[in-house]
Amino acid sequence: SAPSLTTFCLHSSNMSEVENAFRKFAVYGDTSASGNDMTGKNFSKMCKECGVMDGKAVTSTDIDIVFNKVKTKGARTITFDEFQQAMTELCCKRFKGKSPQEALQAVYDLIKGKEPGSVGAT
């Protein structure tokens, strides 16, 4: 059978950069956070600041729905694996007309190398 989207991404050399960005956003505003999981608030911040949420194709409502869909029942945070699932859900909305792989790559290109901006950052 064809490899799943998630497997496809893990082989990408950009994955560690995406994971670094995930960790930076995961600990944002929480000094006790491990960086291994992310709250809905930080997930939303990351999607906004990286341009995954554009307010048209992907809105804050979409972000909330996907976050709640991928997280473990009863949990308040998502892991990096769940984050990747969330991105596979969002990428095709954000980049309509691209193949799932291309859309996912495009979303990861928005994210990699990013870190949370402080207030007023462009």
Image (cartoon, rainbow, N blue to C red):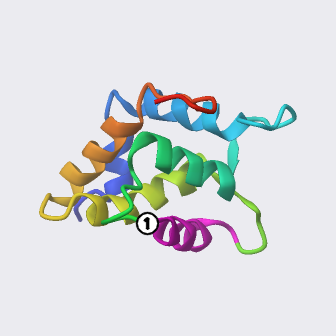
The answer to whether residue 59 of the structure is visible from this angle is: yes
Residue visible at 76% across and 66% down in the picture: 75
Residue visible at 76% across and 62% down in the picture: 76
Amino acid carrying label 1: it is Thr
How packed mark 1 is, by other alpha carbons closer than 10 Å (few <14, some 14-19, many 20 or more), is some
- Determine whether, in the image, residue 100 is placed left or right of residue 23: left
Up-down: is 32 above or below 77?
above
Q: Quadrant of residue 31?
A: top right
Q: Position of residue 57 (x, y in %)?
A: 30, 66
Query: Looking at this view, is 61 or 87 the one in front?
Result: 61
Q: Position of residue 30 (x, y in %)?
A: 81, 37
Q: Is residue 68 magenta?
A: yes
- Quadrant location of the N terminus? bottom left
Magenta span: 59-72
Up-down: is 91 above or below 29?
below
Residue where numbered disc 1 is placed: 59
Q: Position of residue 102 (x, y in %)?
A: 19, 49
The answer to whether residue 11 of the structure is visible from this angle is: no
Query: Looking at this view, is 29 or 87 the one in front?
Result: 29
Residue visible at 43% across and 41% down in the picture: 50
Task: Work out which residue is located at the far front of the displayed protein and give it.
Answer: 120
Up-down: is 107 above or below 93?
above
Task: Work out which residue is located at the far right of the displayed protein and give it.
Answer: 32
SS under mark 1:
loop
Task: Work out which residue is located at the far left of the displayed protein and give it.
Answer: 97
**Predominant SS along the magenta part:** helix
